[in-house]
Amino acid sequence: MAANVPTGTYRVQVRPDFDLDATAGLAGYLHDLGVSHCYSAPLLAATPGSPHGYDVVDPTRVNPELGGPEALRRLATALRQQGLGLVVDIVPNHMGLFQPAANPAWWDVLTHGRDSPYADWFDIDWAAGPIVVPVLGDAADLAKLTVAGGELRYYEHRFPIAPGTGDGSPQQVHDRQHYRLVDWRLGNQLLNYRRFFAVTELAGVRVEDAGVFEATHAEVLRWVAAGDVHGIRVDHPDGLRDPGGYLATLRERAPDVWLVVEKILERGEPLPAHWPVDGTTGYDALGEVCGLFVDPDGAPPVDGPGWDEEAHEQKLAVTRRLFPAELRRLDTLAPGSAETLGELAANFHVYRTYLPYGRADLDAAVAETKRRRPDLAGSLDALLPRLTDPADDLCARFQQLTGAVMAKGVEDTAMYRWNRFVALNEVGGDPSRFGVPPQEFHEAAARRLEQWPAGMTTLSTHDTKRGEDVRARLAVLSEAPDLLLTLYGRAGIPDVSFEALFWQTVVGAWPLSAQRLQAYLTKAAREANRSTSWDAPDEAFEATLAAAVRRLDDDAALRADVEAVVHRIRPFGWSNALGQKLVQLTMPGVPDVYQGTELWEDSLVDPDNRRPVDFAERRDLLAALDAAAVSPPVDDSGVAKLLVVSRALRLRRDRPELFQRYHPVQVTGDPAGHAVAFDRGGALTVVTRLPLRLAAAGGWDAEDLKLPGGTWTDVLTGRVADSSRAGDILATYPVALLVRE
């Protein structure tokens, strides 16, 4: 475990329009909110104009668009003055190629090919010929190349010319280069460098090479050595050739930092215990917390294929559609293996193995492949000795493929097609797993305290499919699934499953503008790749989506029905939102608050969840809250959530001794499990679960919490708990945070 573990973090999407100096201006607010660390998006130089920073182009310097190294020092100083630390997000797996001239290493590789001093930085199949650059509108566009300023140019795209090759026509010059420009649609078939998932503009980096590691990590490690950075979040370690080896090297070079990894764990999958990290970024915790507020008895019937079949079908489809280049590279290592390995990749139920760790997952995938494709049994048996040898290039590259297949097939396709109950369609989630019973939650929390007490917990990230409070409102529908029946069939969308997504999105995030809804629907439909797609948009289908949005704007009766559903579930959604937030903030682990989510959070998938945050409003509301003599109501303002967030974070920071244990608190007289409580060692959390059913039953009655001895005070209201009845403890809010005095 790191020497200095945060008590709470706050994620800021640092980017050109909210740079390092703007982030420094939040230091006082973050201190007042109660976090111990600011947690930033990537800070290294990225593609000019990048709104997220994950497309790093120069790992040797701070992004000048964020203010450069001087601004980073100002941020570190501002945080230090408030007693805060800094956690940074790093991207070891890939670098951005969209603007080659912005990436000095890639530009040099394109210029000099295998002779470039940076040739070993990138995972390029040099035996496959010139580097494939899929950028042309079509093959005929080679005729549109020009030579200007000593460069090859294609519209706004610029490419280098190798020394001594610049004579002749643009086409002749092009044909002498260490790269070949091709139709962008051919990237999935022809690409000869490893990439991030199926993104051709992000090239894989060979950090397993000691020299490459040093060159690409020296700047970040310098921040750590200077005492400016105290924690590191590692993006997408599953893409690396040897994640465990990489993390061991990083830990050796930064022994005292808090180190968490963006590792997506499937249900029941453990984080490799031998990894020298403090935990994951918390998607597993997200699923446990959100599931606690879903009624297991409210699962809608499955209409069509089950989730496992949908997920398998889409993994197999993306393997064939998006990853033929990766399969071709594997086929060069084991001729004739492409079909077998594609089928095997689609049968993994986890993102990847880390052999020899994870051998059971490989064996399970082999068995499932043989069940589905008995004709491949012989081929699988022949390949297995190589697929189980970590020293074999075939084994290493296949492990890198399966994570990409899972991410693109499940997260980015199946979860937009299988829309039974979209609150569960989340990163690392299992949409067929309907709800998490309290006992199961308690067991998971106890395991987290025992195994990964310093891992991050979260409810929202820049990658979640919808904001935490959208999920909280949708969870109410698990208690009353018939409420949406008045809306289904009225959107005019010919794809029945997608219409279900449409109405759940509308009700979950209402009110939302037509522009936001239209942008989300277009992205979701193209990701689903059923009625339209990114590669071949179906104008007719997308017109039906636009018509549905217009109908929602123009049809007063339809809007009234939507608002009636929302009016019915909104207060219970607020109850769930406060409950899941308090649980996440006080359960074992280090709680993260994604920017803006200290008030109600109605965002959808990115880029919607990267909209500007009104920090001035939040600062003013927090100051007013601190000065107020009465508890704020639970209403549209979201101040009640700000109360929960600030009081829980402050308590964790100021009194860490209250959060050293985990004990479920028994509730008698509550067979439906409406009250969930746990004691962290002097700080006791109580939340309301399934609030709509509770209200329908007449509210709290004889439910009684078996409070440990002593006097307990609710830090949310300042009131002494002079009764152990749930109805008395939760008289003001649907949640309580009790402290033993």
Image (cartoon, rainbow, N blue to C red):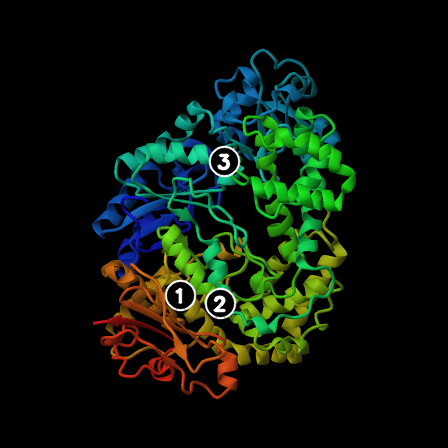
Which label was assigned to residue 583? 1
Residue, disc 3: 93
Whether residues under marks 2 and 1 lie with C-beta atoms below 8 angstroms apart, the answer is yes
Q: How many angstroms separate mark 3 from mark 1 (CA)?
A: 33 Å
Question: Is 81 on the left-hand or right-hand side of 695?
Answer: left
Residue 357 sits above or below residue 623 on the image: above
**In the image, residue 129 lies at what x, y percent?**
66, 20
Residue 254's quadrant in the figure?
top left
In the displayed orientation, state which residue is furthest to the top: 164
Q: How crowded is mark 3: few (under 14 residues within 10 Å), some or many (20 or more)?
A: many
Q: Which is nearer the N-term, disc 3 or disc 1? A: 3
- Would you place residue 697 above or below residue 589 in this image? below
* Residue corresponding to mark 2: 292
Which of the pair 241/740 is nearer the observer? Answer: 740
- Secondary structure under the numbered disc 2 in the rendered image: helix
Q: Is residue 224 visible?
A: yes
First reached walking from the N terminus: tag 2 or tag 3: 3
Instruction: Look at 71% across and 58% down and name the residue there.
Output: 542
**Picture quadrant of residue 664:** bottom left
Position above or below: 327 against 293 = above
Q: Earlier in the sequence, mark 2 or mark 1?
A: 2
Q: Is residue 153 left or right of residue 60?
A: right
Percent x, y of residue 80: 23, 47
Is the Cβ of the residue at disc 3 closer than 8 Å to that at disc 1? Answer: no
Q: Which amino acid does label 3 sit on?
A: Asn
